[in-house]
């Protein structure tokens, strides 16, 4: 089942800043169900360019829980093909071809309602973050800290909406802006200063690569469990005219005859066909693991390698840390040895759940230990008094 693209019409264009425009998209009634989405998800677009097609992802900045029109926000990238074309040329009434919404940068429905939520956005990274913010305000009681970094005040996207939300929910929302123009880039101390109760909290990061690295590094240094950190990478795929050649000769790699794939809570045995990706083999076996761009940059098909080895043609959507942890993209992976291969396509979908629970149990065990100690001290005192 390769990705289907449907025609969506632009119903509004909003100039947010000199560098960024939002586009509201109208979904035909018959596709309303297919285009249901979760806050933080994105659409993949197929666009004509010269004599070939390119694909790009854009996160939805609208909130599904508020019934808002579906909206994306696109910020110009210097020298970029599509971001500039969309800002310069896309008008109301035009159409775009988009996949159904995908992505794992979403709130975990199993997280307890009061768990603090930390959101870190840089520049256009605010698009999925504002959607998460609105959704968390609407559907949970979670206290939310948002740190939003920009070059200067004029480059803030959705500033009025953010200010309104922070005013309307002043008991729950702690909103901080950082402007590089005021004294340089964001630093570790500024992030540290915003962290509190980090033992039982979740963290969402989206922005330029150096910004995300800084935030992730700071969280790691503060002892935050890596499974509590969600990251969305805004990258483009290699367009057909820019595609890099895979240096590994895939035909030379050994492979098992079958591999196991955990999907929707069940382990499935999938025949492996030499030269095909694990996603293609799973699809040939009648399975439909989450996927969207099929080019290694959206992250929708992330899976955990449990046993065995894979080679990825490209893995733009993953950090080196994720690759080292054994996260693989099904759409880019082929087996790299004949060893038994097992992957878990469920494991990273809501990967915070277990970690949050273990953080809670850690917190509860600490509380329990303190309570036991207090009882022992009280008991000793009572015994001394009695004697
Ligand atoms: C899941 C996801 C969600 C996203 N959401 C958003 C969003 O909400 N808003 C948003 O604005 N963006 C978002 N993006 C990023 C977006 O998809 C595009 O990557 C971005 O708009 C740039 O695309 P472009 O075509 O303008 O630039 P491209 O043409 O892809 O170029 C990007 C940069 O790379 C350089 N470059 C590319 N190839 C070469 C080459 N061969 N040699 C030299 N230089 C090269 C270009 O000069 C340019 O500086 C998202 C990405 C992902 C994966
Ligand atoms: S489908 Fe996008 S990374 Fe695999």
Image: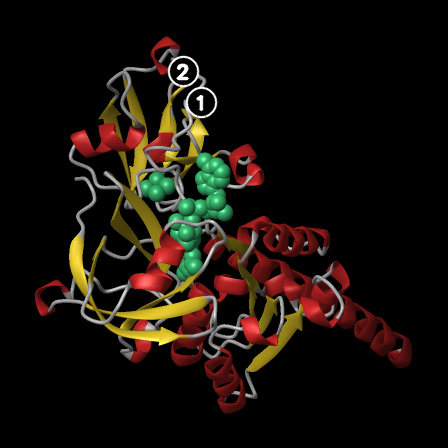
> In the image, is residue 364 above or below residue 217?
below
Of labels 2 and 1, earlier in sequence is 1
Which quadrant does the N terminus fall into?
top left
Q: Is residue 26 visible?
A: yes
Q: Which circle marks residue 275 in the picture?
A: none
> In the image, is residue 354 above or below residue 67?
above
Q: Residue at x 39, y 56 (%)?
A: 83
Q: Residue at x 47, y 66 (%)?
A: 19
Local packing at callout 2 (Cα closer than 10 Å; few below 14, some 14-19, many 20+) is some
* Mark 1 within 8 Å of ligand 2, using the beta carbon: no
Callout 2 touching callout 1 (CB < 8 Å): yes
Q: Which circle marks residue 339 in the picture?
A: 2
Q: Residue at x 58, y 50 (%)?
A: 209
Residue 188 at what x, y percent from top left?
Answer: 74, 59
Q: How is the image coloured?
A: secondary structure
Q: Name the front one of labels 2 and 1.
A: 1
Residue 246 at what x, y percent from top left?
Answer: 42, 22
């Amino acid at each position: 089942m390769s990705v289907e693209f449907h025609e969506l019409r632009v119903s509004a264009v909003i100039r947010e800043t000199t560098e960024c425009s939002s586009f509201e998209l109208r979904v035909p009634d018959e596709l309303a169900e297919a285009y249901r989405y979760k806050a933080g998800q994105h659409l993949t677009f197929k666009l004509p360019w010269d004599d070939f097609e390119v694909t790009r992802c854009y996160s939805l900045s609208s909130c599904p829980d508020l019934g808002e029109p579906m909206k994306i926000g696109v910020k110009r990238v210097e020298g970029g093909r599509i971001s500039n074309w969309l800002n310069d040329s896309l008008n109301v009434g035009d159409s775009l071809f988009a996949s159904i919404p995908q992505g794992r940068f979403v709130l975990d429905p199993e997280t307890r309602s009061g768990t603090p939520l930390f959101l870190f956005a840089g520049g256009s990274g605010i698009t999925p973050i504002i959607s998460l913010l609105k959704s968390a305000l609407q559907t949970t009681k979670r206290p939310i800290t948002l740190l939003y970094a920009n070059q200067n005040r004029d480059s803030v996207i959705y500033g009025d909406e953010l200010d309104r939300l922070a005013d309307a929910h002043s008991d729950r929302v702690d909103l901080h802006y950082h402007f590089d123009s005021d004294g340089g880039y964001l630093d570790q101390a500024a992030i540290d200063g915003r962290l509190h109760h980090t033992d039982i909290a979740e963290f969402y990061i989206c922005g330029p690569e150096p910004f995300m690295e800084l935030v992730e590094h700071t969280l790691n240094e503060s002892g935050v469990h890596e499974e509590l950190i969600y990251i969305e990478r805004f990258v483009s795929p290699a367009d057909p005219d820019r595609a890099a050649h895979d240096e590994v000769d895939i035909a030379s790699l050994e492979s098992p005859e079958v591999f196991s794939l955990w999907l929707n809570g069940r382990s499935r045995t999938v025949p492996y066909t030499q030269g095909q990706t694990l996603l293609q083999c799973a699809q040939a076996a009648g399975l439909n693991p989450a996927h969207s761009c099929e080019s290694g940059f959206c992250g929708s098909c992330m899976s955990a390698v449990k046993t065995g080895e894979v080679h990825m043609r490209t893995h733009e959507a993953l950090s080196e840390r994720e690759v080292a942890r054994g996260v693989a993209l099904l759409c880019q992976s082929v087996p790299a040895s004949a060893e038994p291969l097992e992957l878990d396509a469920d494991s990273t979908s809501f990967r915070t759940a277990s970690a949050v629970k273990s953080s809670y149990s850690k917190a509860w065990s600490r509380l329990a230990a303190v309570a036991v100690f207090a009882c022992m001290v009280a008991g000793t005192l009572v015994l001394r008094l009695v004697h």
